[in-house]
Amino acid sequence: MEPPLGERFARAVAEKDFVKAVSFLHPAVDFRAMTPGKFWEAADPGTVRRDILPRWYEAHDQIEGVVALENGSVGDRRRVRYLYAVRNDDGEFLMEQQAYYEVHDGAITWMRVLCSGWRPRDATPGD
């Protein structure tokens, strides 16, 4: 049995295989995301592949692995949470995203993503 589409999307992004990641999106996907500094919107997989994912994970960013991944649902809406270990010239980071999504006819038709931002890997929460 194949993993849910949200997990397959998250693992493809971790591999920085953006073509594969957007292959799980419907041609008329309703995609929105919020990162710490910006809101992102796309109405097609090409925009997600070209204008969003490469700006979240640039060429010099090395995603070292998926630290945690969790699938679930909220009523009729699916959910995937993933935590990546990332390294670049500025150091080592953790980055978590939570995505809610809907699937119709074998493709993600609606997706909302919330991102933690890049957090120093060795940091601890403050008060």
Image (cartoon, grey):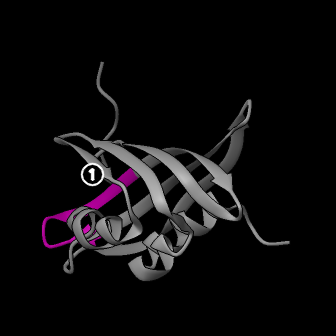
Circle 1 residue: 118
Question: Looking at the image, which residue sits at the far right?
Answer: 1
Question: Looking at the image, which residue sits at the far front?
Answer: 28
Residue 20 vs residue 43, the one in the foreground: 43
Residue 47 shows up from this direction? yes
Residue 16 shows up from this direction? no
Within-10-Å neighbours for mark 1: few <14, some 14–19, many 20+: some
Question: Looking at the image, which residue sits at the far top?
Answer: 127
At a point 34% along the width and 31% down the height, the residue shown is: 125
At a point 71% along the width and 43% down the height, the residue shown is: 72
Q: Amino acid at mark 1?
A: Trp
**In the image, residue 78 lies in the stretch drawn in magenta:** no
Asked whether, in this view, residue 42 is left or right of residue 81, the answer is left
At a point 52% along the width and 65% down the height, the residue shown is: 25
Is residue 109 placed above or below 10 in the rendered structure? above
Asked whether, in this view, residue 79 is left or right of residue 48, the answer is right
Residue 55 vs residue 15, the one in the foreground: 55
Q: How many marks?
A: 1
Q: Quadrant of residue 49?
A: bottom left
Where in the figure is residue 15, as x and y percent of width and height? 45, 79
Where in the figure is residue 94, as x and y percent of width and height? 36, 54
Secondary structure beneath dot 1 equals loop
**In the image, residue 91 lies in the stretch drawn in magenta:** yes
At a point 29% along the width and 49% down the height, the residue shown is: 41
Where in the figure is residue 78, as x and y percent of width and height? 66, 44
Q: Which quadrant: the N terminus?
A: bottom right
**Which segment did they paint magenta?**
87-95
